[in-house]
Amino acid sequence: MNDTKDWIDCDGVSSLIVEEIGDVPLLRVEETLLLDLRRIERMMRCLEMSEEVELFSCSSGRNDVRVKATRLGSDFISNLLQGVSKFDYHFPVHEMNPYIEVFYRCINKLEDSSMLSGWAGLINEDALSFVIQINNVICFARCEMSSKAFKKIKKRFLKASKKRSKSLEEYIDALFVEHSRMLVVRVDLSYRSDFFSKGDGFDDKLKLVKSHWAGMQRDLHKGKPVDSLLGFACKLEYGQLKGFHLHLLLFYNGSNHRQDGVLARMVGEHWRDSITTGAGAYFNCNAVKAKYRSLGIGMINFDQIEYIDVLKRRVASYLTKIDYWVRFSPEKGRAFFRGNMPKKSAVKRGRPRKVRAQRPFETGQRQNSSATHGLL
């Protein structure tokens, strides 16, 4: 259990989600739902670990009997009241975290959900009936989470997410071993809202999107629209509001390029105009990087350890760790793509590298050198 908590919380994933959805671009509904899913998952883990036998009981007053709830019990009710229909709507072809799946089943176990909204005001027989019902639901949840089947699914879910995160971090490290300076570009690729017809089947849409991505990937490797590509990582996502979109992370040779915002724009325009023949859209994250609290894109040298750490644990993490809460259904095929590990050079030319100690700058303290940090 601690392993799960440490892995999720130690790298500031909650911060990276908040940072991602802040105003870069404007607040996005589907990403804010990730915070709701994260809260439910955390609440269910607390329920699993709690030593409180009953979260609800009856309290006798002078004239009546009322419902008494622990803090965790009140939290449980608050989440039940929000329901899961919004998740079903916005994430229609996704697989939820095992804890959230149990929460789904808890809602289905409720015999009379109408009592939820006014549970604090229930008295006498209604109060007693509610306490019995809700405690039974909680008992059901605990039994589910203590089962061998649940633990097996949880282990598999966590292992897959950790493996993907570790793979991307090792990939970034390997790139910096081979290249002393890289220009890191982040672009979000999507489609015009009117591109897909409502009558088109989901699988047909997905097939077209993957065809577009295959074409984009081929062009990137050919040096279109920008040469000197060293590596990439891409995450395919789908949401009811945003439709299909790809989070693309690109690594270019920093000795050949400097203006990261320009490169990101060129990549986005290539997707929009050439790959999708005008049907695409894009968002240039590098053009607004001054809004990020910690910088992990732009020009980064191999010895800028703190910048690389932000790149791995914030920028790259958004492409991998979000899957811990909700992920594209494996039945729909691959949703994460990464370049091949670079081949190790037999001979290193030039002077031996010297790592210099640096402190990462925060927003408002950024250096003005375009040569160092790829500013436009």
Image: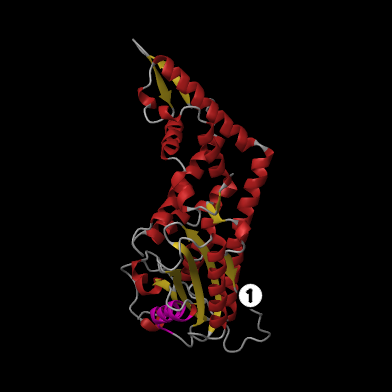
- Residue 221: x and y in percent read 57, 82
In the shown orientation, is residue 16 left or right of residue 5? Answer: left
- Residue 241: x and y in percent read 42, 58
Q: Is residue 166 above or below residue 283?
A: above
Residue beneath disc 1:
340
Residue located at (56% from left, 65% from top): 204
In the shown orientation, is residue 327 left or right of residue 192? Answer: right
- Residue 311: x and y in percent read 48, 68
Residue 199 on the magenta span:
no
- Residue 323: x and y in percent read 54, 56
User: 86 or 230, which lies in front?
Assistant: 86
Q: Is residue 21 above or below residue 345?
A: above
Which span of residues is magenta-colored? Answer: 258-274
Residue located at (58% from left, 89% from top): 350
Residue located at (40% from left, 79% from top): 265
Q: Residue furthest top?
A: 62
Q: Residues within 10 Å of mark 1 (few under 14, many from 20)?
A: few
Residue 272 on the magenta span:
yes
Give residue 218's quadrant in the image. Answer: bottom right
What amino acid does circle 1 point to?
A: Asn
User: 49 or 146, which lies in front?
Assistant: 146
User: 297 or 92, which lies in front?
Assistant: 92
Give residue 22's quadrant in the image. Answer: bottom left
